[in-house]
Each structure stands twice: as structure tokens, then as C-alpha cells.
Amino acid sequence: MTFIFSIYFVINMAIPFITSNIILNLERTHYPYTPFGLSNSQMLQNSNKNSLNFSRNLQTSNNSANLSNIFNIHYNVKLYIGNPKKEFRLILDTGSNWLWVGSSSCKNCYRLGIADLYQCSASQTCHENQDTSVDIQYGIGYVSGYVTKDSVALDPEGSLVVDDQEFLQVKTIQDIEQLKGEGILGIGKKAFIPGTYMTFIENLKKQGKIKNNMYSLYLLGNECQEDSKMMIGGYDELLFEGNITYVQVIDDDFWNIPIQLMYFSKGNETKSIDSIYKKALIDSGSSEIVMNSIDLKDIIGYFESIGISCELISNYQEIQQMTCDESDDMKYPIFNVMINETVFSIQPKDYIASCYFRYFKYLCRLHFVVDDTLQLEEIIILGQTFLNSYYSIYDLENNRIGLAKAKKEETNKGFSLKTSFFQIFALILITNLILFLLEYLCVNLKVCAKIEGMNCVEKLFKDFTIFPDVLVDEAMTERKSPLV
């Protein structure tokens, strides 16, 4: 076997494995289950709970902030802390309540991807109390830190700023994977700490910076784009269409709402998911639709009946995710949730997370994952997969959430994993043809004549110092080995 044919053989064998692993690894970086919202927080501080006073009115608000979509894992918002102001990119989370950033004394922040840390001594308006310890337990992992006060602004000019906003300087982060932000801005329904702590939104209202104690989210789901928005103090009618469906929140601590029915529809056929759970957490901090294993197995059985084979496969976070062997979204049914007599639908293209080729077949991960710890709360989670389709209004005064169809421009994303795979396959085929042609020219037609005293292969590997003669095909040179 000649040297060029050896190259061909190695490339031909290696590329399919390399490409499928690259595709799998790329897929792994997208859409992990990040349930920051299920923060049954354990707070260690002695204080009393303040009552919450809110008001709500229609407002097309100029108090808006752009949100960055981080690989469809979560959304980041920029806040400016301290004097002089320092920018922090924080994960926006409607399911938790604390604002926290990494402290300069954080033990493992750098390892977890938090590069910019907060240093109290660098701010003229910082007041910290390292004797006040707070632990926050999230759905996955927890953080520990101490309470600090400083000015927090939504923009670098400071036109929307809270003076003496309490937040945590986090010293320890445990069991939370690599973060794509420098902390979390919790804008949940209610503060867990009794007494003194008020959220950023609450303080904006208390200090007279906004008229209405509410906010709204316009999430577009465009990966790595900064085109989503958060409106503070109102909502923007230009960003949604149709009527707003309001539903009363049924939980004191979270944005939990009652749901009447979940079902799939395809054509004129429907399949109801007879879930025992009749409430849902609206949570921007979770990237998926999270259910219990019984409901998901019921869904898998239905998919099997329409010709789509699925199973629950543990992802790299060891969380079971619904994975199917069909990559054509036209063959999938529509997922529907009925809330307050209104049906909210999620199209297949929006709940198919990503597809990849492995072991000679296509697999597609769906935005449905299992978390049986939800049995303790008896809820499902409607995360970004749901919110990317619907404009959401968080009305604290009236204890309700408003939902409306978000306005979106239909865009051609120009990317199909199936198309990309066949492009890779075509590239492999063309490479093979070129290598065969080189093989034929060099061996049979003697085109690879000696160039400046040595053949082309020897010239290519002239810098090799280990067994250089082994790399030269005997059929292409008559040079004798120096060992002879």
C-alpha cells in the first residue's frame, strides 16, 4: 500500500467518527436544563418579612434593556454596579429572587467561567456585611455568600438606578456547571429573605424610579443575538399581537399558574396528556419544558403510535431528555397548553432542540426533560421553549401573568444539521476522489517525478527526522536505505 493510499485510508476511517463527535459535542453545548428558578432557597438570616405594595397600569415603557441570547441556554442582561459603575452580564431568572455576583474572594468563580468579579473596595458606595451569610439552593446546585449594598443601574448613564440595592457577593458556587454569565438577576415573584431584602424591581418602584410595579419579557430565541428585551414598569404593545390572556398566580413564592390541559395535535387528531400536575412555573431561568417521567413516557408512547421512535437518554448533565430518531419537523405534532380557556401552541421546530448523526442514524433531542423532584412541587416548568413564542407580562400588583403571541419576523436561519451533514459527506467524497487521483497519477503515470533531486512525497516530509525513508514509497524512488 502506497503512502498516499495510507493517508486516504486513515482520513476515510477517521472523518466520520470525528465529524459525528464534533456534531455531538456542538449539540452538547446547547439547551442544557438550567433550572435556576426552582430555588427553594434556604436563607440564613434573622429578620422579618415586609409586605409588598405594587401598582400596575398600561405603559409603553422606555425603561427597557436588551437581552442577549446565550446559546439558547439562557438570557443575559447588563447591569452596572457601584461607583464608578462596573458592567456585569447577569443571567435573567424569573424563577428566583436574589441578585448576586461573584466576590473577589470567590473560591471557584474563575473555574466556572465568571471572569469579572465584584470588589467592594473599588466602589465608593459599597457597604458589605460579611457576617450575614446567605445560602441559595437552586434546582441544580447552590451558591453561598454575604449581603452587600451598592448602587445598581440598568444603563451606564444611571437613568434607572437603585441606591443601596442589596445583593449577594458569592464566595462559593457548588454543583453548577460552567456559567455563561457573571451572576444572576433574580426577578421572581417574592423575596425569600424575611425583613430587609427587596428585589431590584421592588426597589425601583419603592424609590419612585418606575410608575408601575411590573415588568415584561420579549424573548425571541435567536441564538447569540441581542434582540430580545425586558421592559421594566410596563409592556410594549408593539411587541405582541392579539389579546393578552391574564391568569392569576396561585403561589406566594413563584410565578406558578394553573393549567387546564396539555395535548398534542396533528391535523384533526389530538392526544391529551393526562398529567396529574395542573400548574406550571413560568420560568425564564429554565431552558426546557420540564415534566415528570410518567408524563414523558406517555408522550413517548404517543409518538411511537405516529411512527416516531423516542426514548429518554441522559445528557451530559445526567438529566434524561426525550430523544427521537426523526429529524423532519413536519412529522412531529404540535404541543399545546390550555391556560384560562386559551390554547398556547408550540410548533415542532420550536421544541426540537437539535439533531445530530450518530451510529449511522439521526437523533434529535427535544426540549422535553425529566425532573422527578418536581413531584414535591406537583408542577411542570414552562421555560424558554415556551417563552420564546409568547410575550409575558409579570403583574405584581394584581398577582397575575399576562401572555400574548409575540410578534416575530419569519427568518430563514440558513442552517440544517441534516443539510450540513450531507455537505460534510460530500466533502469526504470529494477528498477521497482527489486522493485516488493523486494515487493514480503518482503510481501509475509516474507524474510524481523527482523534484530537485527528491520525489514529491519525500519533499513533503523532508523535515521528518524519524524514519524518513519509511515514508517514501519504494515504487516511487530507487534511493537505498542508509541502513543497507
Image (cartoon, rainbow, N blue to C red):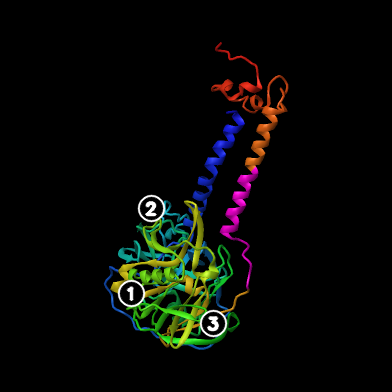
Provide the residue designation for mark 3.
235
The reply to whether the magenta stretch includes residue 421 is: yes
Tell me, for residue 452, which label it has, or none. none
Write down the region rendered in magenta.
410-430
Of 235 and 426, nearer the camera is 426
Provide the residue designation for mark 1.
192
Provide the residue designation for mark 2.
108
Q: What element carries label 1?
A: loop
The reply to whether the magenta stretch includes residue 235 is: no
Quarter of the picture holding the N terminus: top right
Q: What element carries label 2?
A: loop
- Using the numbered discs, state the Cα–Cα distance from disc 1 to disc 3 in whole angstroms: 26 Å
What amino acid is labelled 1 in the image? Phe
Mark toward the start of the polypeptide (1 vs 3): 1
- Using the numbered discs, state the Cα–Cα distance from disc 2 to disc 1 in whole angstroms: 25 Å
- x, y (%) of residue 341? 45, 88
- x, y (%) of residue 464? 58, 25
User: Can the viewer see residue 84?
Assistant: no
Mark toward the start of the polypeptide (2 vs 1): 2
> Badge 3 local density, few (<14 within 10 Å), some, or many (20+)?
many
At horizontal 36% and vertical 74% (from top left) the residue drawn is 197
Direction from residue 313 to residue 223 in the image, left or right:
right
Of 334 and 239, nearer the camera is 334
